[in-house]
Amino acid sequence: MNTEILGIILMFVVTVSLAIPLGRYIGKILSKEKTLSDKFLNPLDQLFYKLSGINPEKEMSWKQHLLALLTINLVWFLIAMFVLTNMSWLPLNPDNNPSMSGDLAFNTAVSFITNTNLQHYSGETGMSYLGQLTLMLWQFISAGCGIAIAAVVFMAMKERTTDKLGNFYFYFVRTCTRILLPIAIVVASLLAFNGVPMTFEGKDTITNLQGDQLEVSRGPVAAFVAIKHLGTNGGGFFGPNSAHPFENPNFTTNIIEITTQMLIPLAMIFAMGYIIKRRKLAWTIFGVMTLGFLLLMVPTVISEVHGNPAISHIGISQNMGNMEGKEVRFGSAASAYWSIATTVISTGSVNSMHDSFMPLSGMNQMLGMMVNAFYGGVGVGFLNFYIFIILAVFISGLMVGRTPEFLGKKIEAKEMKIAMMIALLHPLLILAGTAIASYTYAHHSETYASWLNNPGFHGFSEMLYEFTSSSANNGSGFEGLGDNTPFWNIACGIIMLMARYLPIIGPVAIAGSLAAKKYIPESAGTLKTDTPTFGLMVFAVIAIVAALSFFPALALGPIAEYFTLK
């Protein structure tokens, strides 16, 4: 067990060590500074610009950035719908897998366009290779959009007074060609050398130890798994996701995948510090996010290592901890670490079954998504945290009797209204969705009996988790829920759309509004936002506005279930 704990420490230290220089590199990429990659990749960028007729030098306002984002996402959604509903006759389908129904295709297309990757299907039986490759492309695109839109906010924070914030397509293309693609190639190669399949052949026939012949699914898995983690997408090529031995064969690949999925979310914090020339602010934000991450991760690891008390009471040894739903090759501690990392950073990939974790561990997984601001997904994770910074600055200004200011710009009623609407949207989507589902099931339990294998406290948690995952753009699930139904496909699809784009529109609107205001030089009375004191203020705002909003729902689910084990 001590080895597993050392493994966790190693994975986190390696991730931070890689994220700091990567953040500097991302900062240079987004700031148009010269890098070694320019010599090789400038021609590729220019090819994209020429084919699409884009002028990367044309400056855009914050509204034009959002229009570009929403327009191209709509086009990609329509393409995805066409492919998913016609896979049966389209090429690259060696296993003759069927096309998706309309409601499942809607859910899947929305899921991958929004960087959620919630999967109400199993890839090996429900998807052709063309479908998988299409979704793999969207994993590049959605991650690129997230980083590009974060770059807009960074530029707004950097400039003193302006309404021009760079070019969305410039940020998007450079993100894909200089950040996502090179790192994904390296990660995919490492995974392939460690046994992850990379082929376009269909199922392979093998003979097992008992002499039975089995058909085993395979495909271009290594490339898919690399970008699913690098872009904090999380969609699995196979149904069990990274618990499947073809996606995550051993502890080495486990380290590679967990490091990869945390890499860019951490690096974006340091990229922000580099771009706006406020490294101390970046470290303050990193400290707050890391504190929140550790407060969720440490209790989860302890809970899973100690095992299930109900099993201990009947005299069964749990030397390896709570191993239900976990892979022996990873162990309980590393699985617990992954579960919090993947829910905090909105990746949603799993190397164990979250439905089988201890109740309070499941609660911590949900809290990571409910807060949705400790690291978060690529790009948009910082946007969520930005909202809490605005709220904390405003409250701090009121407490000391001064006009709230952030980076030399006054925060006024307009910005506060937007910030509060975005902060309250997340709880509204989760709790309203769960309430509707609970009411529907309670009043028509025979009709919807297939939804829940575990009625009661845990069944409520399964429904709460599904809507939390959808709203947090996460995609993981308590898979005891029967979710491939029209209700869950459509309801989760609508929530994923609202929870992806409104939290992007809000922070960008605030940043654009502040950027256009007159710059006010710092003075002796200016609130310092790069101090531990302000960091604790932001953490308190997160705890009050986000976490406490969900306490009643958590009390009905995982907390109530916890007391049944005593």
Image (spheres, rainbow, N blue to C red):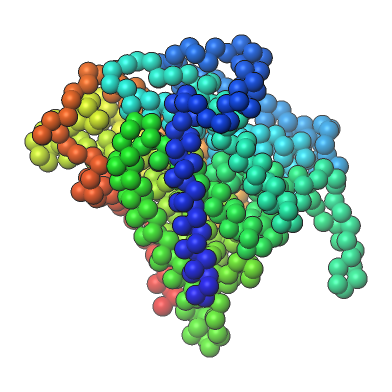
Q: Residue at x 66, y 18 (%)?
A: 47
Q: Is residue 100 above or below residue 455?
A: above
Drawn side of residue 23 relative to residue 88, left or right: left
Q: Nearer the viewer, residue 503 or 443?
A: 503
Q: Position of residue 487 (x, y in %)?
A: 58, 42
Q: Residue at x 17, y 37 (%)?
A: 527
Drawn side of residue 41 relative to residue 19, left or right: right
Q: Position of residue 357 (x, y in %)?
A: 52, 66
Q: Is residue 376 above or below residue 151?
A: below
Drawn side of residue 447 relative to residue 514, left or right: right
Q: How many marks?
A: 0
Q: Position of residue 65 (x, y in %)?
A: 46, 20
Q: Say which quadrant the C terminus sits in.
A: bottom left
Q: Position of residue 25 (x, y in %)?
A: 48, 36
Q: Residue at x 44, y 45 (%)?
A: 20
Q: Nearer the viewer, residue 311 or 129?
A: 129
Q: Is residue 317 above or below residue 73?
A: below
| Rendering quarter of residue 419 | top left
Q: Residue at x 40, y 19 (%)?
A: 165
Residue with the most extreme bottom position = 315
